[in-house]
Amino acid sequence: MELLKVNTDNVTIAIPFSELKELVTLIVCDVLERQAATDKKKNDFATLSSKDVQNILGVSKTTLWHWKNNGTLLPIQVGRRTLYKQSDITELLTKNVAEYE
């Protein structure tokens, strides 16, 4: 069996299926890891309004105020707007789910 065959227009490489499968798996895993890292960076900068956070978490404006005062969930003030980092909301949800289990 010829491993590498070259002519002027094409290159043909012969490798066992198991090695091809392993190579494809490594490439796909690498791409997925890079995509996850990119998504995490995007989520670190994404923000939600107070109203959005109230709807997502099912809490009142008063609860958000208490959480701000006790450090549970700290908002970002942009002018008169109160915003919350999406990554903080995700972290809070993840923490609460872990405590529940």
Image (tube, rainbow, N blue to C red):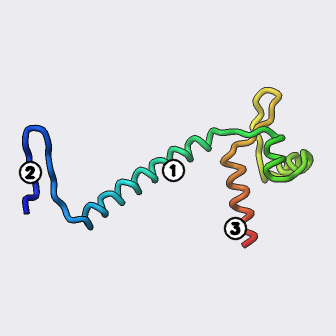
Residue 99 vertical position relative to residue 11 in the rendered view, above or below: below
Report the side of 83 relative to 44 (left or right). Answer: right
Residue 60 vertical position relative to residue 48 in the rendered view, above or below: below
Few, some or many residues within 10 Å of mark 3 (<14, 14–19, 20+): few
* Circle 3: element type: helix
* Circle 2: element type: strand
Frontmost residue, 22 versus 9: 9
* Residue that mark 2 sits on: 5
How far apart marks 3 and 1 lie (CA) works out to 21 Å
- Residue 79 lies, in percent from the top left, at 79, 26
Q: Residue at x 45, y 52 (%)?
A: 32
Q: Residue at x 90, y 49 (%)?
A: 60
Residue 36 numbered tag: 1
Residue 50 vertical position relative to residue 32 in the rendered view, above or below: above
Residue 86 numbered tag: none
How far apart marks 1 and 2 lie (CA) works out to 38 Å
How far apart marks 2 and 3 lie (CA) works out to 56 Å
* Residue that mark 3 sits on: 98
Q: Residue lying farthest right? A: 62
Q: Earlier in the sequence, mark 2 or mark 3?
A: 2
Q: Residue at x 77, y 49 (%)?
A: 73
- Residue 64 lies, in percent from the top left, at 85, 47
Q: Earlier in the sequence, mark 3 or mark 1?
A: 1
